[in-house]
């Protein structure tokens, strides 16, 4: 069980739900029923040994998340898989009801087969998953990443068109389009492109792709994003 904030919700809930069902417990310190429901959720979900995960969101401290769920009363509990709400309830529930709710989230035999193929991670296994689930949010980016690594960038880009853009898919697509130059070459290219980004969409996209490949942790990334904004506006 972990506490989630507005700032961490996308990573800890939406992204994480692509790998395992995530139960979101929306609560507040002043809510008496929340305090009786919380321990039940923790107990029952702990018994799944990681097959279902629990996160808690204090609605008073995290209004954006509360608004996203359109919370009108608490406790409110929602289960997410693959970034989507698949089940939920409002109000305190007893242990039998909570256990039934969690049971519905446990992986089926098919889910377990898919998870094993994704864990294996070779091209044949990933293509087997996509044959059954063409838009699988984990297998598809994983295969696209593998294709980039094996010099099949165009095939990777076509594959990524099947699913909505995410930070992960943007980075993979950027790698495919740029060929992953070294950091020194990227910085030199960014300096040159900066003079041409205004009014040229292709140049702007090339600049953004190079920033994606450079990565958010590189010490120059934030500076070049600021310089891009100044050049455009």
Image (cartoon, grey):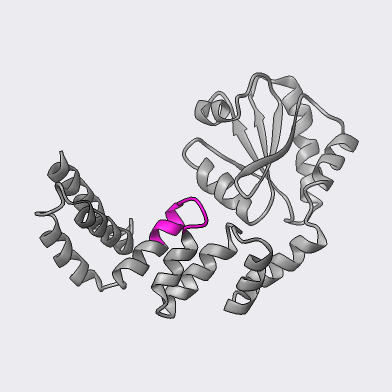
Position of 29 with respect to 113 (left or right) is left
Position of 214 with respect to 101 (left or right) is left
Q: Please identify the quadrant where the N terminus is shown.
A: top right
Q: Please identify the quadrant where the C terminus is shown.
A: top left
- The image position of residue 85, as x and y in percent, is 66, 39
Residue range in magenta is: 161-171
Is 33 placed above or below 206 here?
above
Position of 222 with respect to 2 (left or right) is left
Is 203 placed above or below 117 here?
above
Q: Is residue 110 magenta?
A: no
- The image position of residue 143, as x and y in percent, is 53, 70
Of residue 103 and residue 178, the one placed in the foreground of this image is: 178
Quadrant for residue 38, please give it: top right
Residue closest to the far right: 96
- The image position of residue 164, as x and y in percent, is 49, 50
The residue that appears at 58% across and 57% down in the rendered structure is: 137
Q: Is residue 167 magenta?
A: yes
Of residue 19 and residue 172, the one placed in the foreground of this image is: 172
The residue that appears at 75% across and 61% down in the rendered structure is: 111
Of residue 168 and residue 130, the one placed in the foreground of this image is: 130
Quadrant for residue 54, please give it: top right
Is 40 placed above or below 109 here?
above
């Amino acid at each position: 069980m972990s506490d989630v904030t507005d700032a961490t919700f996308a990573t800890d809930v939406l992204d994480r739900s692509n790998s395992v069902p995530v139960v979101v417990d929306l609560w507040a310190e002043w809510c008496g029923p929340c305090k009786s429901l919380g321990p039940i959720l923790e107990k029952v979900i702990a018994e799944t040994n990681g097959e279902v995960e629990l996160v808690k969101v204090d609605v008073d401290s995290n209004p954006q998340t509360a608004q996203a769920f359109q919370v009108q009363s608490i406790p409110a509990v929602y289960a997410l898989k693959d970034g989507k709400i698949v089940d939920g309830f409002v109000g305190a529930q007893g242990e039998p009801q909570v256990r039934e709710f969690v049971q519905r989230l446990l992986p089926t035999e098919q889910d377990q087969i898919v998870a094993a193929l994704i864990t294996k991670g070779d091209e044949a296994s990933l293509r087997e998953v996509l044959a059954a689930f063409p838009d699988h949010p984990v297998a598809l980016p994983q295969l696209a990443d593998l294709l980039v690594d094996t010099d099949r960038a165009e095939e990777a880009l076509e594959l990524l068109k099947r699913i909505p853009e995410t930070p992960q898919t943007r980075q993979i697509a950027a790698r495919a389009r740029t060929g992953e130059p070294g950091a020194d070459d990227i910085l030199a290219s960014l300096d040159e492109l900066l003079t041409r980004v205004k009014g040229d969409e292709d140049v702007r996209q090339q600049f953004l792709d190079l920033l994606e490949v450079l990565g958010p942790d590189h010490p120059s990334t934030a500076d070049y994003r600021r310089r891009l904004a100044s050049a455009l506006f």
